[in-house]
Image (tube, helix red, strand yellow):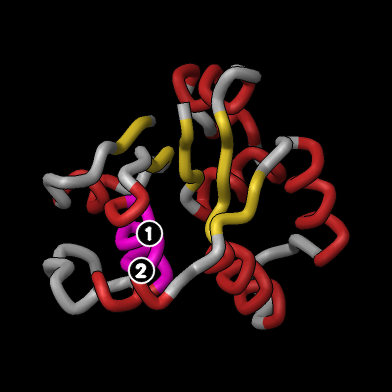
Amino acid sequence: MRLLLDTVVLIFAVESPERLTKRATALLRNTENILEVSAISLSEIAIKAARGKLKLSVADTHSALEDLDLRILPYTAHHAFYLFDLPLHHADPFDRQIIAQAVCEKIPVVTCDEKFSLYKELKVLW
């Protein structure tokens, strides 16, 4: 199954895996799953690290991508145009872009963010 990890799930997997649910851990460990992370998540991590809100370095982030065997999902104009129709259930611009990607790509998102569940066309796993 193809899965898109929310930024927080990637951060938890690196910094505090005990915060992941048993289900999320199983999804990440299942080698049959295709795990993806949005290019938007990489931007979010870089911005938050630069502001001192995260301790992840560029090397840590590269290692996490490799260790978790993550593919990077590019953010496209198609995803961006979908934002025009996306309801304003969630104010965070990074999350809104990830939601738009997941809906456009028709893939579930692994996240603990309860606001993602407000989007009826989105499948959320946690």
Q: Image check: 1 left or right of 54?
A: left
Location of mark 1 (residue): 101
Predominant SS along the magenta part = helix
Which stretch is magenta?
94-102
Q: Foreground: 21 or 36?
A: 36
Q: Is residue 98 magenta?
A: yes
Instruction: Tell me whether circle 2 and circle 1 mark residues in contact (CB < 8 Å).
Output: yes
Q: Quadrant of residue 34?
A: top right
Q: In the rendered view, would you say 49 is above or below 98? A: below
Q: Residues within 10 Å of mark 2 (few under 14, many from 20)?
A: some
The quadrant the C terminus occupies is top left
Q: Secondary structure at mark 2?
A: helix
**How far across and down, in percent of the image, does residue 99 sit?**
32, 57
For the residues labelled 2 and 1, the Cα–Cα distance comes to: 5 Å
Location of mark 2 (residue): 79
Q: In the rendered view, would you say 12 is above or below 85? A: above
Q: Image check: 41 left or right of 123?
A: right
Q: Amino acid at mark 2?
A: His
Q: Which mark is residue 46?
A: none
Which residue occupies 69% across, 72% down? 49
Q: Amino acid at mark 1?
A: Gln
